[in-house]
Image (cartoon, grey):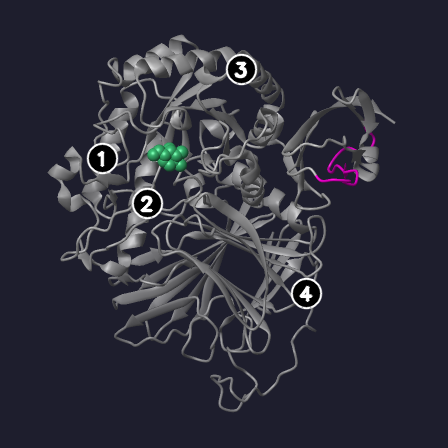
Amino acid sequence: MIGYDEERQLFHLKTEKFSYLMQVSEDGSLIHRYFGKRVEHYGLGHNPPKLDRSFSPGPFAKERTFSLDTLSLEYSSNGLGDFRTSAIELRSEAGVNLALKYQDHRQYRGKPRLPGLPSSYGNQEEVESLEIDLRDDCQDVTVTLFYYLFERANMLVRSVRVRAGARAVKLQKCLSLMLDLPARDFKIHSLTGRYAYEKERTLTKLQQGSYRISSVRGASGHAQTPFLALAAPDAGEDRGEVYSSHLVYSGNFQAFAEVGPLKTLRLGLGINDTGFAWHLAPHEEFYSPEAWISYTDAGFADMSQTSHRFIKEHLVRGTFQQELRPILLNNWEATYFDFSEEKLLALADKAREVGIELFVLDDGWFGERNSDTCSLGDWQVNSKKLPGGLKGLADELHQRGLKFGLWVEPEMISEDSDLYRQHPDWAVRAEGYAHTYSREQLVLDLSKAEVCDYLIDTLTELFKSARIDYVKWDMNRNITNIPAQFSNHEREEFHHRYMLGLYRILESLYQTFPHILFESCSGGGGRYDLGMLHYMPQTWTSDDTDAIARLSIQEGTSLIYPLITMGAHVSAVPNHQVGRITPLRTRGHVGMLGNLGYELDLTALGPKDLEEIAQQIKTYKEIRSTVQFGTFHRLETRSNNEHAYLILDEQQAVLTYIKTLAQPEAPLSQVRLKGLDPHALYTCEALGSSYYGDELMNIGLTLPYVQEDFYSLQYIFTKKGEKR
Ligand code: DGJ
């Protein structure tokens, strides 16, 4: 609930778990009072002693103890006392100062959509809204801070609108979130990595200065995720305070945590201001993307589960929000570009035999595309490879009882393509500079309305041309060589205008094809973010398909994103990225920790492997609803050599355990389960035994002693009605 004490001008936002307090100060600034474990009351005794800090300037000549530099603020700019990293910067004829003073506020139930941007949603019961207007009369600018409180989901969603008055304004920075907290001995948790090595969990101790992650790639990128968490020193998987923050955006972003000289801590999240500006004509407005913050005192597991639930219930939309995701076969690592209809149908026949439900035709089906050097933009079928066209193939697959999925990479254009020959000016390039290439391809300029309209029409026609049930939307390079001026806009607007163009295309396709399951991909997890998940409920997690490498990638991903959003495929051995040979069993178990798929040549496998795959698929169908809609736990293991996970719902619990390398004289391994009903009886067929929930959670299970590299096991515990 959102409370307002008029006399004290104090806002108290309360969810089941946390309180968030703000107050208007004596100079009219909006001060941040508290964010943390829920409190019922906020009395008068919390004002810190007033100190005259010699190098902290302020607005009152005779009140030397007041400075914006020493206060916790809600949203601040530099220039009038606050020397910390700002949340907003602008420039107009009135100069560059911005003195944001409380003007007004409004409260209501429900939540409006954010214009042109992906955003969370909730009905009137689920979400309560607060809008606070801050004014600078000199600049004639109104900055509105939006607070959307999801009380039961324990999430506070924030965003910002800047509205120009009678004067034009150049906005140079506009973060979605600024959060000032007292600097405790926090560690900052982020997800870092690189191509094919995404989402490594990184914990760094905060010290005076800044920890910052950012992207200027035109995409959120493989190397960083628009997310930061602050963890108390004693925080672990199941205990301790953790503050998490997320940005719902897929383009250039920044996220930082800054400890100031007076041990204040400022967290910031928003569009990257490097190379960014937005020109507001009189009375125009700018909306920042949305940022989410949450708090728990129960560690990373609770942080992840809060985020998983919120994504599933308040971000992802459409038919597939609540539907089981099909088990797929993707032909990429099976054939790469070298396929014919005959080969695809042979793969499909095997796929059907083992119980696969969806056949995905990856790159190479269009134009003259026999390698990654050409044809992006020419979305017409290559009839040498597919004489019956897409429709013919889709019909054949449907006749075999399989759904049909198609790969596209619509944001790109090859120099060697008909589209480029017709519209060379549609590729992003700064005048006077030669193209910069990546995978020999160029980027279509989605900041141009005509290019977006063209893509909407072309893709709408394409997706209607055959029975298409699934689309994999790829994006295999980042954006460079940006024009200094484009369509009457300055260079600094390019990246955000590109994102608005992309989101417009995705929204249009989502509205026209609600039944299509979209999976987003950018060379794996190069754009695995909350922005894309609003339009596409799945993401291809990584181009590294090796089961062992995947463990840390998928585990890192699970810190924020639910398993139902992760594409996880079983591929061939030796693995195509790292050359490792792992047992099929292990590859299957790792695949089952997400949306299971297969990406290997099934026609090259012997009957034993096919039988094993059929068995895996049968098992996955039995546990699929638990994996996709249940609760996920990372379990404690002795070292990084072992990984254990539990996924559970009301009916069953699935334990997956993987030991990477065999060790001589290894100690016995044990795991303790979590989240079970302590008094319910759980039966495990594989163990031939039943256990009460409290035994599994407190005593745990001793695992088999097996001397084998890349060993894995999966135990399914069925919950029986019986209670003690
Ligand atoms: C990159 C993707 O991540 C792969 O899965 C595959 O679709 C290729 N692109 C195709 O070019």
Residue visible at 75% across and 34% down? 676
Q: Is residue 193 above or below residue 383?
A: below
Q: Nearer the viewer, residue 657 or 262?
A: 657
Q: Quadrant of the C terminus?
A: top right
State left or right for residue 507 relative to residue 203: left
Q: Which numbered circle lies on residue 374?
A: 1
Q: CA distance from mark 3 to mark 2?
A: 36 Å
In percent of width and height, residue 293 lies at: 55, 54
- Select label 2 or label 4 by which is in front: 2
Q: Examine the image and state in which quarter residue 64 appears.
A: bottom right
Mark 1 secondary-structure assignment: loop
Q: Examine the image and state in which quarter residue 94 appears.
A: bottom left
Find ligand 1 in the image and state its quadrant. Answer: top left
What residue is pinned by disc 4? 42
For label 4, the crowd category at 10 Å Cα-Cα, with few meaning under 14, some 14 to 19 and many 20 or more, is: few
Q: CA distance from mark 2 to mark 1?
A: 14 Å
The answer to whether one can see residue 561 in this image is no
Going from N to C along the chain, the mark reached first, 2 or 1, is 1
What residue is pinned by disc 3? 610
Residue with the most extreme bottom position: 62
Q: Amino acid at mark 4?
A: Tyr
Identify the magenta region: 663-680
Residue visible at 63% across and 51% down? 15
Going from N to C along the chain, the mark reached first, 4 or 3, is 4
Q: Is mark 3 within 8 Å of ligand 1?
A: no
Q: Which numbered circle lies on residue 477?
A: 2
